[in-house]
Amino acid sequence: MRLRIGVEHIAIILTVFLGFVIVAIGIMTSLDANRLSSVNRELLQRNHALGLLATIRENTTAIRSAEYAYLLQPKQALMKTYQLARATVETSIEALRDYHLNFKEVASAIPQLGQHAAALGTRTQRTFTIKSDDKTKLIGDALTNPEADRLLATVMGVERIMSERANEAQTRLTGILASSEMRTIITAIACLFAIVLGGFAVKAQGRSQRELLDKMSRMAQYDGMTALPNRVLTVDRLRQQVMQAARSKEAFSVLAFDLDGFKKVNDTHGHAGGDDLLKQVAKRCERSLRENDTVGRMGGDEFVAILPSTNTDGAQLASGKMLAAIKEPYRLNNGSTVFVGASIGIAVYDLHGRDAATLLKHADAASYVAKGRGKGQYVVFENGMIVPDKLSAPDSSR
């Protein structure tokens, strides 16, 4: 009898202990879910702020280019380009104010950004309106343009800090996911013993915890609308592919493309129609490529495809298949039929670059050349190609 009582007591103690362990792990997992959501939100905000800073940088360059070009050959279109670029810079700086309470680097830089942008606008406006026969000095001033340099230096300084913080947040995100996964394994073991000793209820709790972590992990790495890998995951896969190619000495290809005519669909059928179109485009791109290829959405209507073990000829063949799939008519949810195309730029490791950033840049440059040559085609990167300013691209409306 004493032995039986002792075993019962042990069973009760073990059951209670396992119950406390499971509850403690559940609380820690719940806290991890909150931390995961917070870090994911921070990453999204930092990526948006980085996008605004990139817009300021690109349009500052556009203002400088328009001023210099106007002095060489006055054209009304250059003044419109300048006005649009200046308005975009001011709007982007104003949008950055939404993050001044979250990020100290943004709060400290906003006054300088505003001052430098105002100085650049005043200086460039004066250049466009001044009447002088001697343009030699004006052209020299346009080449140096200290106002633009100060604005660009401030923007790049904030971008550097923001990028570092974004990388730190990504590291925290990875650590949270790893620790949560380990706790999930421990929970599963505890559930197994609890089932033997006390019941089956804990097993469902462990499963729900794993589902929650998987859901949060997917939210952090996949685009919520198209279900494609988002920018963070796509770039990470590209970096991994670069490391693998460096070891295997095997070529792979990167395709950068956006949709020709997407803005018209978005304006005509609203954001719901545009979102519906992007979902269909994503599915067609995945179906036209191999199972081990990656198609990711970088934002808006911009996509990147990573094709392992693919040389230039293979990339051109894959691009042709994607172009054919994309240009087929689309039936939107509202019953409308629309047509879009794509302009694809191709970069091949290691012909056109040996790191992720260079390959993306060169593929993007080739896509803009494809768009400039008439759209609906693919172009392989060649030395000398650059990504033009989007405001002066052949079709800025896409």
Image (cartoon, grey):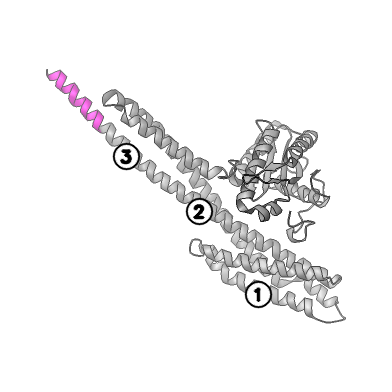
Of the residues shown, which amino acid type is indicated by label 1?
Ala
Can the viewer see residue 323 in this picture? yes
Q: Could you tell me the amino acid type at mark 2? A: Glu
Q: Regarding mark 2 in the picture, which secondary structure is present there? A: helix
Q: Which x, y percent locates residue 23?
A: 31, 38
Q: Secondary structure at mark 3?
A: helix
Can you give x and y, in whole percent of width and height, for residue 264 in the image? 71, 54
Q: Which residues are magenta?
A: 1-16
Residue 9: name its quadrant: top left
Q: Is residue 270 above or below residue 26?
A: below
Indicate whether 349 appears above or below 300.
Answer: above
* Picture residue at 46% right of the left edge, 48% below the top: 37
User: Which quadrant holds residue 73?
Assistant: bottom right
Where is residue 279 drawn, in percent x and y? 62, 43
Q: Which residue is mark 1?
A: 118
Say which quarter of the image contains residue 397: bottom right
Local crowd size for mark 3, using a 10 Å CA cut-off: few (<14), some (14–19), many (≥20): few
Front-lying residue, 322 or 101: 322
Any magenta on residue 7? yes
The stretch drawn in magenta includes residue 139: no
Which residue in the structure is indicated by mark 2? 42
